[in-house]
Image (cartoon, coloured by chain):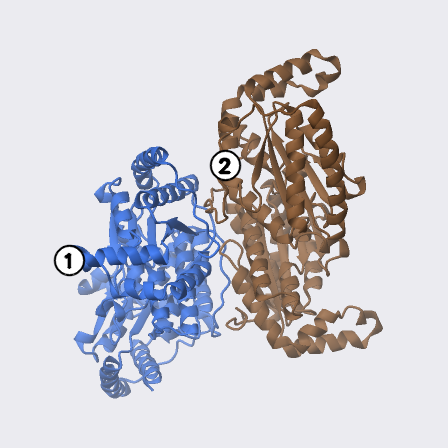
Chain colours: A brown, B blue
């Protein structure tokens, strides 16, 4: 793009002034519409060091009420961020509906820098690009407006600016190592930016190159691109988008009705096994901490299937400093106002840590599907979005273990009645549980579809027969241990 | 995609049967909705030779009324087609609103074959991919549903099928040279398909890989992908889409108000010049015929500006076997029912020929804009769509000459009155002309914007001052001659 790109003609001073004023007025008006349309807007400002990205953002946001936007300067990842998946710190910053998020440099800058410094192999680069494409597609598919700007200046101009900055003590600090590196490898760097823009441009989120030689002209171009993007988004009612094909290897899974629920274990055997397995898990926990392997354990299952007790037997073996349990209830407003995976992205463990989810992102294709909390197109798309999410985690190096805790309808009734009739257990049973129970068959169908479509080789489901809860606990421990041993070997 | 792709599990016979029945029923129902939604549907069936593309299409169309679909087997381009731009024969086949078009192999097959046979350089390949991307984006941006399937079989399977076909006289002819070439270079070919799918997949028109080992299973996958695509499209109301940034070098142009209209030429000089220039143009016409250079001359201008007389002075110098004049009125129903550029694509000249358009595709950003025949988003997007169209022509090797024939408002009034008052000229003046005249200022604004945004280096506008029509004619001849000389040198 950069090679072929020819800047638009900079207007005369008078016209520039007028157009700036007009664009600013527009943006001021549009911020209200953004709120009314509940539109989440991400403005990615990428480009050369010293091209004036920050100062352009500074001028643009003067036209937006501070309640409606945030700016994030994406410097090099912190040590903590480096222990998360590549996209973590970007996804963490996606805005709520009705708000703007400005990113001063983002994923492209990071990719190009890593590439230039030889930290990223060809394969690594392709993986990154694929990750970015998937994320961007997921965002726009889910109603986000993504405006991507690239601030462009020539090698000579960049050199001049860097030297001017370096001259004065007050501005010297603003020249980063990366800026200098860019300038001394300008052509190679331009090639990398170019390639990356070609690889990550899409019709839903195209790149706009901003001629940044003159700062007010750059400001105008950025403002106009942003306003143009907003205008398009306002005209769109939320439409359906293509359901992507699954491209990941799937593991063949049984239907829930085919699961043998008669398995059981004697008390004696249970005690013995539990002790041994927990001791082994404890050991492994230390090793994965040392080897910095992140682990994600996801629990789903019928109400009263025994998830809670099962989780306890896992955590009982773990060092509390190295794990966290995330009980997932219905989303909070700030979570509901974002991409549905956001609240899981932001709960990802650091490398070497274990995150256990008591209910998960699979709510999208179960309760949200059946209760109509999202559109049909939304949940149909979600199988693949979830596979992509887990693929991301798997490529990052995470061990992903997903449990479906299975019981039959009669067992559930028994346990519901027991809860109802036992004063200290009554809090565990709600009207909603009874209502959900009425939809057992619909849920069963949805769960079968979910298990079939999301049992990827890198993140297969494990079905735990839990009519005998003890049996299910021993099974869970065995599976966790087996998977950790595999990852650590 | 092929490398990473893992086929979905083929269902058991009973399930396969049921799902086939269900999908067929769906498609039968959906064909009516396609009609009602006035949705144009392109189904591109690409894939390996002998993968069963044709027979799958044959089975799918049994569920559609013959009035609603066409099938085109895109064999190698004919000699005539080879004298048109690469995309010509594909664009020519795009369906009307409410209809299906099935393409048995399409642009990818052609690109991969040319690539394998070494007919396409790296740069040539990139150009093709860019062309395809642009076209696909233009189609989906303009409301087309594009379903792209790739029928995949293994090297071994392909070999087996080719050998089976070759065994029998009745089927021997079905094995093409290209099929055999594919099989003997299977890995390289798979790589090329893979790359091409990665390069041309988009969120609006993704690739679906069909596991074609079993023909009924392939049929089911294709049917389900098609039905899925239709479901998504039915849920969409026509939304606004991003306006792409101009990436082409523009030539700085004056405003209409800045054009000096006082230029004139004496009768004597006119006669002399006309004779000389026409003689020269005649010569050049022969040369460009021989050198197979295609030429496109586009005329736009105010009513009564003198376009007709101007065109006559050009054609007066040309051999009638080598040119065609296309007067462009409002589109016919079958034209209106397609992408607005379709009627121009299908009127492109062959190499060595001249096509003169009396009014053009620029109607989109003038009359269609001002009369509300298309949405604001449509005409705003059109500047770039048109630049892309002309870029396509230019890369094909065409000389593109665009004239705006300019007069002032008073001159128009004089000529209108003269037409009105001269019986033999009355047919030339209509109520519509008077109505358009009332909107002069709006048109002037639109024309200024059009000239500014579409004067690319490869297809700049030429403004012809035509208060003195003779002056304008001489100018036009000079410009045509200059451009042809440039192209022929």
Q: What residue is disc 2 on?
A: A253
Q: Nearer the viewer, residue A487 or A298?
A: A487
Give the percent coordinates (x, y) of residue A445.
Answer: 48, 29
User: Would you place residue B88 above or below residue A350 in this image?
Assistant: below
- Residue A173, quarter of picture: bottom right
Give the percent coordinates (x, y) of residue B212.
Answer: 34, 49
Q: What residue is disc 1 on?
A: B169
Task: Count residues near mark 1 (Cα–Cα under 10 Å), then give few for <14, some for 14-19, many for 20+.
Answer: few
The subunit carrying tag 1 is B
Circle 2 SS class: loop
The answer to whether residue B459 is left or right of residue B161 is: right
Mark 1 on the same chain as mark 2: no
Task: Count residues near mark 2 (Cα–Cα under 10 Å), then give few for <14, some for 14-19, many for 20+.
Answer: some
Task: Name the residue: 71% across, 63% down.
Answer: A55
Circle 1 SS class: helix
Q: Nearer the viewer, residue A481 or B104?
A: A481
């Amino acid at each position: 793009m950069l090679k072929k790109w020819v800047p638009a003609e900079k207007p005369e001073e008078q016209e520039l002034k007028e157009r700036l004023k007009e664009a600013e007025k527009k943006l001021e008006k549009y911020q209200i519409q953004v709120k009314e349309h509940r539109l989440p807007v991400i403005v990615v400002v990428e480009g050369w060091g010293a091209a004036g990205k920050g100062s352009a953002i500074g001028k643009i946001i003067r036209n937006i009420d501070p309640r409606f936007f945030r700016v994030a300067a994406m410097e090099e990842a912190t040590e903590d961020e480096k222990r998360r998946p590549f996209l973590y710190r970007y996804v963490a910053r996606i805005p709520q509906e009705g708000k703007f998020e400005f990113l001063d440099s983002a994923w492209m800058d990071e990719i190009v820098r890593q590439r230039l410094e030889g930290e990223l192999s060809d394969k690594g680069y392709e993986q990154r690009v694929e990750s970015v494409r998937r994320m961007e597609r997921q965002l726009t598919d889910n109603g986000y407006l993504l405006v991507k700007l690239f601030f462009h200046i020539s090698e000579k101009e960049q050199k001049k600016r860097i030297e001017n900055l370096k001259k004065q003590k007050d501005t010297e600090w603003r020249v980063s190592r990366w800026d200098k590196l860019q300038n001394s490898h300008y052509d190679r760097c331009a090639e990398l930016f170019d390639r990356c823009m070609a690889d990550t441009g899409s019709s839903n989120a195209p790149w706009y190159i901003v001629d940044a030689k003159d700062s007010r002209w750059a400001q105008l171009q950025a403002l106009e691109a942003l306003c143009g993007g907003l205008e398009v988004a306002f005209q769109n009612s939320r439409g359906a988008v293509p359901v992507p094909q699954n491209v990941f290897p799937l593991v063949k899974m049984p239907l829930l009705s085919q699961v043998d629920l008669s398995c059981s274990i004697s008390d004696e055997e249970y005690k013995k096994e539990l002790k041994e397995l927990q001791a082994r898990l404890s050991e492994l926990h230390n090793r994965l901490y040392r080897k910095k392997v992140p682990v994600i354990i996801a629990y789903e299952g019928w109400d009263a299937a025994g998830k809670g007790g099962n989780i306890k037997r896992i955590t009982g073996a773990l060092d509390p400093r190295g794990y966290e349990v995330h009980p997932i209830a219905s989303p909070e407003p700030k979570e509901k106002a974002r991409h549905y995976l956001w609240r899981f992205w932001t709960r990802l463990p650091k490398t070497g840590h274990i995150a256990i989810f008591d209910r998960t992102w699979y709510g999208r294709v179960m309760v949200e599907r059946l209760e109509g909390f999202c559109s049909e197109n939304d949940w149909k798309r979600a199988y693949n979005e979830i596979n992509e999410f887990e693929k991301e985690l798997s490529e990052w190096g995470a061990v992903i273990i997903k449990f479906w805790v299975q019981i039959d309808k009669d067992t559930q009734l028994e346990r519901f009645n027991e809860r109802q009739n036992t004063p200290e257990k009554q809090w565990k049973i709600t009207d909603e549980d009874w209502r959900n129970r009425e939809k057992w068959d619909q849920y069963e169908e949805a769960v079968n579809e979910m298990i079939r479509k999301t049992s990827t080789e890198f993140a297969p489901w494990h079905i735990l027969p839990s009519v005998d809860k003890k049996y299910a606990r021993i099974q869970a421990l065995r599976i966790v241990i087996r998977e950790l041993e595999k990852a650590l070997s």
